[in-house]
Image (spheres, rainbow, N blue to C red):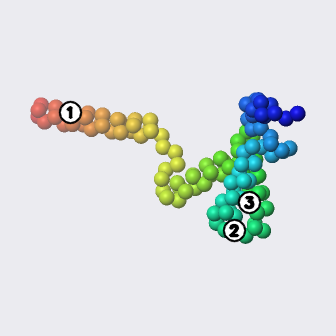
Amino acid sequence: MFSVTHFRSEFIRHNQAAILRKVTMTQFMLVIVLTAIGVGLFNAPLWLTPLFIMAGYTAGYTHNGEILLKRLLAYLAVWLRHLVGVPQIVNVQAEWDSVRVRAERQQIGKSFVATVVVEG
């Protein structure tokens, strides 16, 4: 017999609880959301509904412990950042070190020039 407590314990125990056989909760929600957005919001024809269902099922698929939708969104974000020209990886520590070294060199150069002028 199925009960809410059983479903909650299964959901807590596993990363994603299975609603139907081979359909996780994430996949189920993505199917509903993508179908509602496609047909309801964008007025797509009803014959495209199976396409939205397949897209939702595929986007919620877990591969190597990672939901495929997250991987696709990360790839899209990197591609858009590259297109706009924003750097993909910024090493803040290396940037700070280069600025600090440059400032120290300027300070050393100024003090060297000042001692040469005073002595000369």
Q: Which callout, 2 or 1, points to the residue nearer the camera? A: 2
Counting residues from the start of the chain, the first of labels 3 and 2 encountered is 2
Is there a contact, CB below 8 Å, between mark 3 and mark 2? yes
- The amino acid type found where label 2 is placed reads Ala
Q: Mark 2 sits on what residue?
A: 44
Q: Can residue 106 be seen in this view?
A: yes
* In-image side of 73 versus 54 (left or right): left
SS at badge 2? loop
Separation of marks 1 and 3 at Cα, in angstroms: 69 Å
Q: Mark 1 sits on what residue?
A: 111
SS at badge 3? helix
Q: Which mark is residue 102?
A: none
* In-image side of 76 versus 62 (left or right): left
Is there a contact, CB below 8 Å, between mark 1 and mark 3? no
Which quarter of the rendered picture does the C terminus lie within? top left
In the rendered image, the vertical position of residue 38 relative to residue 113, given as above or below: below
Q: Which callout, 1 or 3, points to the residue nearer the camera? A: 3
Q: Can residue 63 be seen in this view?
A: no
Q: Mark 3 sits on what residue?
A: 52
In the rendered image, the vertical position of residue 2 relative to residue 38, given as above or below: above
Separation of marks 2 and 1 at Cα, in angstroms: 72 Å
In the rendered image, the vertical position of residue 112 relative to residue 74, given as above or below: above
Seen as rendered, the residue at the extreme right is 1
- The amino acid type found where label 1 is placed reads Ser
* In-image side of 66 versus 108 (left or right): right
Q: Picture quarter containing residue 54?
A: bottom right
Counting residues from the start of the chain, the first of labels 1 and 3 encountered is 3
Q: Position of residue 103 (x, y in %)?
A: 30, 37
